[in-house]
Image (cartoon, grey):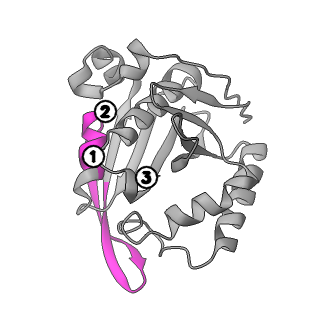
Amino acid sequence: MKFDTVHLETERVLIRLVKESDSRSLYKIYSDPKAMEYWSSIPFENESQATELVKSAINNFDSGSSLLLAIILKESGELVGTLNLFNVYAESKRAEVGYILSSLFWRKGLMAESFGALIHFCFEHLKLNRLEADIDPDNVASSALLKKHGFKVEGLLKERWIVNGNITDSEVYGLVKSSYNKQLNTDSAYGLTFCKNTQNNVSANLTG
């Protein structure tokens, strides 16, 4: 499968592919214990890990296996988080999504705005039929984000992750295109001001 250039724009953020110059900003986010509290790996310990993350992301983009997108504040140009699309199965038109936001920018609605743009991109431009996510059941904020955008809890995987010696479960969420379409115009369900009131600049496709 092949991805073209990705550029998404909402009222407050630009969303683009990560690049080499993002390494320092990504390190600040991925080394933040608050932001990484429920992650499936421990926080980064040095900037070289962020450099490797970017290199891997670029290679995965070139091979068509995943996307790692940077969330950029329009106002300041600052990179404040990432969105991830991975485990893409072109034939089944499904993929997994992930996200992280610097704790300095929590409770401002930025992730809800950015995640809404990603969902729109996946269903309307990549023509996917199903999105999946798995989170730590204790991650209340992530659960609220997914439910806000129409995802439903589909199951619990016991003791799925062992991170730094700690065993945690995974709560599995799913959203299908038909459900998305039914509620697309209901702000309370999705918060998709992206679709209604802001620019939607997208250049991307997915081919099997």
Identify the element where label 3 is drawn.
strand
Pointer 2 residue: 149
Q: Earlier in the sequence, mark 2 or mark 3?
A: 3
The quadrant where residue 61 appears? top right
Highlighted magenta segment, given as a residue range: 142-171
Across and down, in percent, residue 140 comes to 22, 55
As drawn, the label of residue 137 is none
Q: Which mark is residue 101?
A: 3
- Circle 2 residues within 10 Å: few <14, some 14–19, many ≥20: many
Q: Earlier in the sequence, mark 2 or mark 1?
A: 2
> Whole-Å distance between the Cαs marked 2 and 3?
17 Å
Q: Nearer the viewer, mark 2 or mark 1?
A: 2
- Residue at image point 30% right, 27% down: 190
Residue 154: image tag: 1
* Percent position of residue 11, x then y: 45, 25
At x 38% / y 58%, what residue is drawn? 103
**Label 3 amino acid?**
Leu
Using residue 135 as the reference point, say whether residue 59 is left or right of it: right
Q: Residue at x 42, y 78 (%)?
A: 163
* Type of amino acid at the residue the image marks with label 1: Glu
- Does 60 appear above or below 124? below
What residue lies at 67% left-to-right and 25% top-to-bottom? 205
Distance of label 2 from label 1 (alpha carbons)? 15 Å
Q: Which is more toward the observer, 48 or 169?
A: 48
What secondary structure prevails in the magenta region?
Answer: strand
The mark closer to the camera, 3 or 1, is: 3
In this picture, residue 131 sits left or right of residue 153: right
Q: Please state, as top left, top right, bottom left or bottom right, where the N terminus lies in the image.
A: top right
- The image shows residue 92 at horizontal and vertical percentages of 54, 34
Q: Is residue 168 magenta?
A: yes
Element type at mark 2 = loop
